[in-house]
Image (cartoon, rainbow, N blue to C red):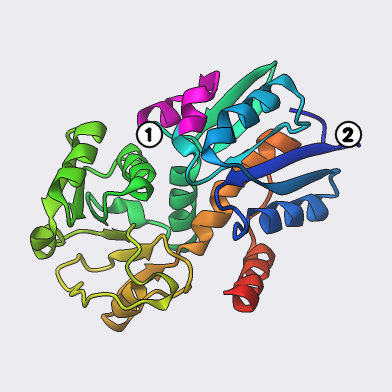
């Protein structure tokens, strides 16, 4: 950590393959400007076979970075190569945030934090439910299952086309997590207060199957981690059926804040100005 009044230039990154569509530089550059801090945050496209070398240069100080974000396909390798992964990333087996501290490379995963912070900001009280349904068992669902479980939700039902993949997550995250095939969806939705889509259904405006949300509890919240389009077909269906919805953009914004604080020493604000900045970029570039 450093005093925010320092003029020392600090440099951070987002790395992935590909990484050119990442909106993280827009987010972090906005915060640097608003907070009047010296620093940079840039895209670093790194091939999988070059990633170990990239981290080696980071650890040695040769790269000039104090840390950064890691996205697909490097999250698992980032966790494995970190010197000090935290408990969250250990359970997930994946890290999305790295920082140097006393010569050691630390790692965490802020996706679950971003997911919860978005719900807390947009639908406060959502966590009074004791049953959640999570659609999808891919990499994106792991941090969400972990976060919802750690918040204290008693029953988490993971529904997936391939039952075996959902069962792997139930085995990983413990007794509160239950695996189901798609056919069980109407049954497990009964009385649930939270429905989360972690699949790519409806991404980029693609069609999504029809969902009947009527079995959900009164006052249930439906959310989607996809944010292009902002109101996905699944969220549109939920709105039409009278349910509160939370879009996925806030998750992207909130998950960025802990890393920024590690690299630049100040906790940034996720506010309407930042949201509008990203929405304008989405409108311009899709």
The structure residue drawn at horizontal position 62% and vertical position 57%, both measured from the top left corner, is 20
SS at badge 1: helix
Residue holding disc 2: 8
249 displayed left or right of 175: right
Q: Quadrant of residue 178?
A: top left
Q: Is residue 79 magenta?
A: yes
Where residue 50 appears, as percent x and y from the top left, is: 59, 34
Residue 148 in the image: state x and y as whole percent.
Answer: 33, 45
Residue 14 vertical placement versus 277 (above, below): above
Q: Real-space Cα distance between discs 1 and 2?
A: 34 Å
Q: Nearer the viewer, residue 168 or 144?
A: 168
Name the quadrant containing residue 99. top right
Q: Is residue 183 visible?
A: yes
Numbered marks: total: 2
What span is in magenta?
77-91
* 228 over 39 or under it: above or below: below
Which residue of the protein is positioned furthest toward the bottom in this rendering? 240
Could you say which is closer to the camera, residue 80 or residue 24? Answer: 80
Specify whether residue 239 is painted magenta.
Answer: no
> Is 83 left or right of 147, judged from the image as shown?
right
Prevailing secondary structure class for the magenta stretch in the rendered image: helix
N-terminal of the pair, mark 1 or mark 2, is: 2
Q: Which mark is residue 92?
A: 1
Q: Residues within 10 Å of mark 1 (few under 14, many from 20)?
A: many
Quarter of the picture holding the C terminus: bottom right
Q: Nearest the camera: 83 or 63?
A: 63
How packed mark 2 is, by other alpha carbons closer than 10 Å (few <14, some 14-19, many 20 or more), is few
Going by the picture, which residue comes out furthest to the front? 49
């Amino acid at each position: 950590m450093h005093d925010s009044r320092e003029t020392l230039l600090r440099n951070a990154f987002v790395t992935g393959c590909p990484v050119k569509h990442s909106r993280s530089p827009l987010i972090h550059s906005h915060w640097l400007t608003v907070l009047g801090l010296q620093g940079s945050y840039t895209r670093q496209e790194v091939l999988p076979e070059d990633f170990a070398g990239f981290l080696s240069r980071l650890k040695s100080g040769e790269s000039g970075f104090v840390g950064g974000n890691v996205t697909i396909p490097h999250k698992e390798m980032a966790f494995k190569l970190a010197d000090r992964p935290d408990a969250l990333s250990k359970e997930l087996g994946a890290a999305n945030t790295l920082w140097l501290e006393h010569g050691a490379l630390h790692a965490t995963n802020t996706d679950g934090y971003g997911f919860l912070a978005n719900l807390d900001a947009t639908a406060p009280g959502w966590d009074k439910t004791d049953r959640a349904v999570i659609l999808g068992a891919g990499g994106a669902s792991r941090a969400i299952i972990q976060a919802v479980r750690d918040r204290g939700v008693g029953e988490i039902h993971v529904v997936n086309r391939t039952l075996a993949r959902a069962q792997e997550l139930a085995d990983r995250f413990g007794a509160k997590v239950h695996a189901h095939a798609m056919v069980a969806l109407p049954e497990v939705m009964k009385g649930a207060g939270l429905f989360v889509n972690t699949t790519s259904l409806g991404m980029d405006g693609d069609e999504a199957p029809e969902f009947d949300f009527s079995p959900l509890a009164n006052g249930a919240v439906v959310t989607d981690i996809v944010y292009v389009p902002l109101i996905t077909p699944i969220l549109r269906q939920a709105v039409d059926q009278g349910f509160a919805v939370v879009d996925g953009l806030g998750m992207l914004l909130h998950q960025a804040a802990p890393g920024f604080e590690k690299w630049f020493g100040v906790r940034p604000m996720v506010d309407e100005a930042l949201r509008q900045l990203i929405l304008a970029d989405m409108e311009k570039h899709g």
